[in-house]
Each structure stands twice: as structure tokens, then as C-alpha cells.
């Protein structure tokens, strides 16, 4: 098990609970696991639309992903977990990607396509397509959220990645996410992939890392897609620098495997998924022989 746990405070006003937690193994290897979107804490000063249902507020969360990947620490992976809800700040977005529709003084341009759709670093829309606010945010509010949540989370992730490379010559980031069942469905509602691996079309990690992950998931009988519809977000892009010894791949798990999205609770597939992800983690980290 982990020998210690580091917690970072929400530096904006101290009232938002823990911004992140780092689970550190007794003997750290080259692997770092991250879950930026499994946080469930929403600061009381968020000021979301008071009529917004809680289910909508939380609809973009990567529900229970933190629990699924926690076994990684027993195999030598350092695990970095976001603790604040994705609707507060999206930790898998460029911190400069501010939405001018939501944030006063954020500039004139629409930013990225995701930001234009309402899903910038501070989202304007919920995961199920509702407006998060009945007001605009000030630029000071936005900057405080980024400084107090986004910046310390990524500082902690950077510390762990650099430490892994220093110790082992390379660092392997697995950025874990989940996707709603509807996002993975094909035409006519056909069931889509169980897992999507995003390696930025082969540029963010060694081909061997992607192959090992794919084989481990397929050994469970799960359907695996590569880079469609998710090729890897900002974190994968930032740390996917194989020539520098930093490898990164994004894993998207279909929530239909394990989660009842209507009840927001583990579904009937939870035990099978929990054991399956644990098997994948064990298989992946068993090839990390020099944890010294």
C-alpha cells in the first residue's frame, strides 16, 4: 500500500476542500496514474445556477474512476487524483482557454472549439448540456480558480513525472477518464467501444505502451478503440514527449461497464469492471521491473 498521502488545499479561499491528493507507493516505479475528473467537491462559493439539479452539476464527472485506479499504488504507480468537481475547473484543459461568453474580460476570441461549445477550463455547460450559471464570472474569479485548483494539481503531477524520469530514465503517464455510454454509441444506438485509448495518433507515447494497454483490455474481452472519438486531451498533449522520456496515454472507460448514470451509483457491472481494471493494472505494471 501507499506509504504516504499528500493533499493540496484549494488556494483560492481555502473553503473548497482538497484540490488534489497524491497516493505514493512505498517503492515508486516509472508509472504515474492520474484522474483529473473524479472529484466530487464543489466549493460553496461556486455560484452555479441555484435551479440546476445536482445530477446535471455532476454529469461531467468521471464517476468512481479514482476507486478503479487506486490499486495502482500497490504495484508501484504514483496516483494523482483531482478532488474538486469538473464543473468548478476542468483539469484537462489549457489554463489559458477561457470562455469569453462566461467570463467577463476574457478576451474577444472564442478560443478552442471545446471552449466555444461551453467546455473550456472553466466550463459554461454541464455534461448533459445545461447552462451551469445564470450569471457571468469575473476574470478575477476565473484566475483564482485556476491558481487555487488547476495550478497546484498540475504542479503535483509535474513533480511526480519528473521524479519518475529522474529515477528510471523515463516516466509513463496513464491519464484515466470515463465516457458516458451515449458518447461511445455508434449509428442507431449500437454499443460502442468499452475502452478508448488516446495516444495523440501515436505521437504521445511509445507504440509498445499503447500495445500493452490494448492487449490487457482485450484479454478481458472488452472492445478497444484507438483515438476515436478521444485522441487525448491537454494533459496527454503536455506530457506526451517520448523523445524527452515522458510518455502519456489517455484511457477512457465506458461508464456502461460499471455505472448507473441515472442513479449515479455503481451498476451491476461494477464488480466485474473493478476486478478487470485491477487485472489490467497488474499486467501493465508487471513490466516495470526496476522499481528501486
Image (spheres, rainbow, N blue to C red):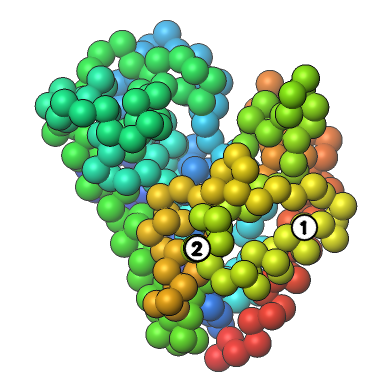
- Which of the 4 quarters of the picture holds residue 179? top right
- Name the secondary structure under disc 1: helix
Front residue of 273 and 8: 273
Residue at screen point 85% across, 60% down: 219
Above or below for 288 versus 143: below
Where does the image place residue 37, in percent across and percent down from the top left?
49, 43
Query: With respect to residue 166, does 80 lie above or below?
Result: above
Q: Mark 1 — residue? A: 217
Q: Is residue 10 visible?
A: no
Q: Residues within 10 Å of mark 1 (few under 14, many from 20)?
A: many
> In the image, what residue occupies the spot 37% across and 48% down?
19
Placement of the N terminus among the 4 image quadrants: bottom right
Q: In this rendering, is residue 244 above or below 56? A: below
Tell me: residue 137, above or below residue 160: above
Q: Quadrant of the C terminus?
A: bottom right
Estimate the x, y position of residue 199 in percent, counting from the top left. Answer: 55, 58
Location of residue 283 in the rendering, given as x and y in whole percent from the top left corner? 75, 71
Residue 90 is left or right of residue 31, and the answer is left
In the image, 291 versus 191, the foreground residue is 191
Q: What is the CA distance from the residue labelled 2 to the residue labelled 1?
A: 21 Å
Residue at 72% from the left image edge and 29% from the top image edge: 185
Q: How many marks?
A: 2
Question: Disc 2 vs disc 1: which is toward the camera?
Answer: 2
Residue 203 is marked as: 2
Classed neighbour count for the residue bearing mark 2: other residues with Cα under 10 Å, few (<14), some (14–19), many (≥20): some
Q: Which residue is rendered at x = 30% and y = 21% of the image?
A: 47
Across and down, in percent, residue 76 comes to: 60, 76
First of labels 2, 1 by sequence position: 2
Along the viewing direction, whichever of 272 and 100 lies nearer the viewer: 100
Amino acid at each position: 500500500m501507499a506509504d504516504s498521502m499528500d493533499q493540496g488545499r484549494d488556494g483560492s479561499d481555502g473553503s473548497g476542500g482538497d484540490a488534489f491528493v497524491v497516493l505514493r507507493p512505498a517503492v515508486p516505479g516509472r508509472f504515474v496514474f492520474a484522474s483529473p475528473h473524479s472529484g466530487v467537491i464543489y466549493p460553496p462559493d461556486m455560484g452555479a445556477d441555484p435551479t440546476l439539479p445536482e445530477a446535471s452539476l455532476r454529469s461531467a464527472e468521471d464517476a468512481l474512476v479514482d476507486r478503479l485506479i487506486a490499486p495502482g499504488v500497490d504495484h508501484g504507480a504514483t496516483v494523482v487524483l483531482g478532488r474538486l468537481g469538473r464543473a468548478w475547473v476542468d483539469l484537462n484543459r489549457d489554463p489559458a482557454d477561457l470562455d469569453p461568453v462566461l467570463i467577463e474580460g476574457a478576451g474577444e476570441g472564442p478560443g478552442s472549439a471545446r471552449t466555444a461549445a461551453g467546455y473550456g477550463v472553466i466550463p459554461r455547460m454541464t455534461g448533459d448540456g445545461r447552462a451551469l450559471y445564470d450569471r457571468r464570472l469575473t476574470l478575477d474569479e476565473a484566475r483564482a480558480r485556476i491558481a487555487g485548483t488547476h495550478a497546484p494539481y498540475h504542479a503535483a503531477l509535474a513533480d511526480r513525472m519528473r521524479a519518475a524520469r529522474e529515477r528510471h530514465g523515463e516516466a509513463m503517464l496513464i491519464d484515466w477518464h470515463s465516457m458516458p455510454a451515449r458518447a461511445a454509441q455508434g449509428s442507431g444506438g449500437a454499443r460502442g467501444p468499452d475502452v478508448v485509448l488516446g495516444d495523440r495518433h501515436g505521437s504521445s507515447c511509445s507504440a509498445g505502451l499503447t500495445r500493452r494497454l490494448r492487449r490487457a483490455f482485450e484479454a478481458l474481452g472488452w472492445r478497444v478503440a484507438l483515438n476515436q472519438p478521444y485522441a487525448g486531451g491537454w494533459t496527454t498533449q503536455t506530457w506526451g514527449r517520448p523523445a524527452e522520456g515522458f510518455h502519456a496515454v489517455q484511457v477512457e472507460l465506458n461508464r456502461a461497464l460499471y455505472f448507473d448514470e441515472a442513479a449515479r451509483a455503481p451498476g451491476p457491472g461494477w464488480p466485474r469492471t473493478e476486478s478487470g481494471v485491477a487485472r489490467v493494472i497488474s499486467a501493465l505494471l508487471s513490466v516495470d521491473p526496476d522499481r528501486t
